[in-house]
Image (cartoon, rainbow, N blue to C red):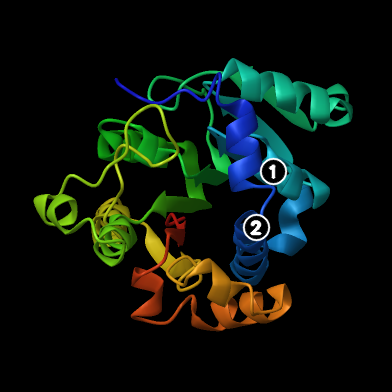
Amino acid sequence: MTYVNFDGLFDRFSQQIYQTQKGRLRMHLIDALYNRYLPIDSFKSLSVLDAAGGLGQMSHWFMNRGASVNYFDVSNDMVSHVNSSFSNYVESTQLKVQQGSISSISFDHSFDIVNIHAVLEWLEDPLPVLESALRWVRPGGYIGLMVYNKHMLMLRNLMRGTLKRAMSGEIAGDKRGLTPISPLDPIEISQLLQNNGFSVITQAGIRSFSDLAEKTVVDWYEEEDLFDAELQLCEQRPYCDMARYVLFIARKPS
């Protein structure tokens, strides 16, 4: 299966996605929503799979709360970074790290929580991979799934003046940049989860309006005020359908 590997893009990926106000806002919103809907008080007894976990921020989030984490990523650069940055967790066996692709890796057991953030959109054919990944969730367990919203990308193209490109539907990125090759429709994702027996606990927009605003406007706001507004709107329609990313938290029946 065709996919994008971030080997060679590590520094660009790290600097443009996480070391910015947008990156902090993304993590802040995820933190708030996971604390709201996941069984935080039970984390010390739970196992987590951080699938295609990139730089390991979410692995670290779960480990800080006591969970045991299995991490994997297809990128050798990412895996090396996680092994080095979280070596104390590896040595204590709270963290297991391996290299592999989400489209081909397999496990001989399931997990209490499966975390899949911003990876499906980098696959040429993401939906069959998601259906397979749902099997990694044990009965009664949760999936935290974040996808890149094709509707936001379409709207952004229209707002930037690339009308012909937007209306042709050719809005996906190429394999050399940081615009995903397969942006996803949140309606299709929600339906797929439900078709596989999952109950969608929440659908939330990650950066529902701030990515649409001009930078000069966003700079008027204090970062905390921006977060408070995004958090207030993120689970409301139509705002949750307009976000750069859409986060689903869903539960598998016991």
Place of residue 31 in the rendered image (x, y in percent of width and height, measured from the top left) = 67, 62
Residue 186 in the image, given as x and y percentages of width and height: 30, 60
User: Which residue is at the front of the view, 31 or 156?
Assistant: 156
Q: Check disc 1 and give the amino acid type.
A: Gln
Q: Is residue 185 left or right of residue 175?
A: left
When the figure is inspected, residue 214 is found, relative to residue 53, above or below; the finding is: below
The disc at residue 57 is 1
Q: Residue visible at 60% across and 16% down?
A: 76
Q: Mark 2 to mark 1: distance in Å?
A: 9 Å
Element type at mark 1: helix
Q: What is the quadrant of the N terminus in the image?
A: top left
Question: Is label 2 in contact with label 1 (beta carbons under 8 Å)?
Answer: yes
- Ranked by sequence position, the earlier of labels 2 and 1 is 2
Front-lying residue, 3 or 15: 15
Seen at 73% across and 57% down, the residue is 42
Residue 159, picture quadrant: bottom left
| Image position of 51 with respect to 239: above or below | above
92 and 7: which one is in front? 7
Residue 131, placed above or below residue 99 = below
